[in-house]
Image (tube, helix red, strand yellow):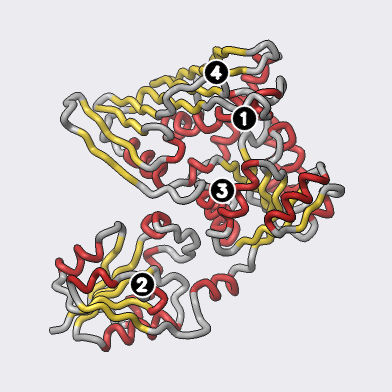
Amino acid sequence: MTRVITYGSFDLFHEGHYKLLERAKALGDYLIVGVTTEQYDESRGKLNVVDSIIDRIENVKKTGFADKIIVEDHIGQKVEDIHKYSVDIFTIGSDWTGEFDYLNDFCKVIYLDRTKEISSTLLRTQKYPIIKLGIVGTGRIASRFVPEAKFVSGIEAISAFNPNEESAKRFADRFGVQGYWKSFDNFLEPLDAVYIASLHQTHFEYAKAALSMGKHVLCEKPMALSKAQVLELFAIAKENDCLLMEAIKTAYCPGFNQLLGVARSGIIGNIVDVEACFTRIADPDTRESRDPNFGGGFLEFGNHTMLPIFKLLGTQYKDVSFNSIKNENGIDLYTKASFTFEKGMALSKTGVAVKSEGQLIIAGTKGYILAESPWWLTKSFEVRFENAYKKEQYTAKFLGDGLRYELSEFVSLIHNGERKSYKFTEEESIAMAGVVEKFMETRT
């Protein structure tokens, strides 16, 4: 008996998939089909899968070609499966030609020609029209965002807005988009969605205007500087059937979500303490180092450090207090925000002129989790126990600057008609805004 194996996402199942499986089956007597998980696709940088794995497996099953269907969820599994199932032939589409030649050491490798003029990308475009995106703000984050957007199907950055004409023109020329600097309404008119990466104090007004015109909004943190403002934004979003999402990239990254899953699994017992640190020594001429009203460590990084705290201990804290080291202008160079919960506590450490170990520690009654610096770009973490020799290590891919993950979530929710993300919830955004508001009160 000749055993054949092939793999794929089989997303938006089409004629090309059918013919590929048909030809794969013709190569032997027994066909094994591996269907990739969403998490594995994300780890490989494929961020635009539409159908669930259940639907994709069912579509493969309906063809009648697969004698066995398996799930592929990690790197190196192909070699494992070839040995496990005594495979004679590995086959895959010709767009991967050369990529799997190393498998010739274990079985015969055959690349099959793809069906021309049809693809999941084309069908995805037909099913979901391209989202036209505008970028508000043309600074450091926006400059990283445009290249990252190219890795996410279904969206195109077409314009940028900055009231500073010179900055808008420079950004537009650099990235090949249309620049706006006079009328924000004219900028919004042709768009489906906006990404707001302007100054902290401008986020609320820009987001409010965009939502009021029926545009979906992905807004950098902090979304607003008070709880009332964030509540108002979510109310406008609901009224206009728009998606409003706060852009803390860590919340949408595979490694961080894996860490949350492990922490919640009970492996370290009850979680009683979360300590998160995010600091850097910023250029003294930058906004965060010079602006006495909206600069400083906590406004810059506080939402990042609050993310694991609220994810693991909930948003219903009993109290929060702040201790800051400030310069002569009142800018917090280093801030510790201490939280108390009914059954736990947490500490957020942020700074723009003090450097500390940028780690995340989650303490439990059976052990603890350590994600070393920079934990917000979660690529690995360890679970440690009382027995120092007992450790469990986890790793995950983190691609590019990580902005592609939040944008992928944004696009997916819009396409599926959903208006909430479980990865970063409305309740968490509201809670963070409440803490930011309390912090701003300490400044006055």
The residue pinned by badge 2 equals 58
Dot 4 lies on which element? strand
> Around disc 3, counting alpha carbons within 10 Å, would you say few (fewer than 14), some (14 to 19), or many (20 or more)?
some
**Disc 2 versus disc 1: nearer the observer:** 1
Figure check: 160 above or below 355? below
Question: What is the distance, in whole Å, between disc 1 and disc 3 at their CAs?
Answer: 17 Å
C-alpha gap between disc 2 and disc 3: 27 Å
Identify the residue shown where x is 49% and y is 22%.
Answer: 355
- Residue nearest the observer in this picture, 27 or 258: 27
- Could you say where residue 364 lies in the image, as x and y percent from the top left? 30, 26
Task: Say which residue label 3 marks.
Answer: 420
Q: Residue 335 carries which label?
A: 4
Residue 417 visible in this rendered orientation of the protein: no
Pointer 2 or 4: first along the chain? 2
- What type is the residue that disc 1 sits on? Ala
Residue 255, by quadrant, is: top left
- In the rendered image, residue 37, in percent from the top left (x then y), is placed at 36, 60
Mark 1 vs mark 4, CA separation in Å: 17 Å
- Residue tagged 1: 433
Q: Residue 173's spot in the image, x, y percent? A: 74, 55
Q: Which amino acid does label 3 sit on?
A: Lys
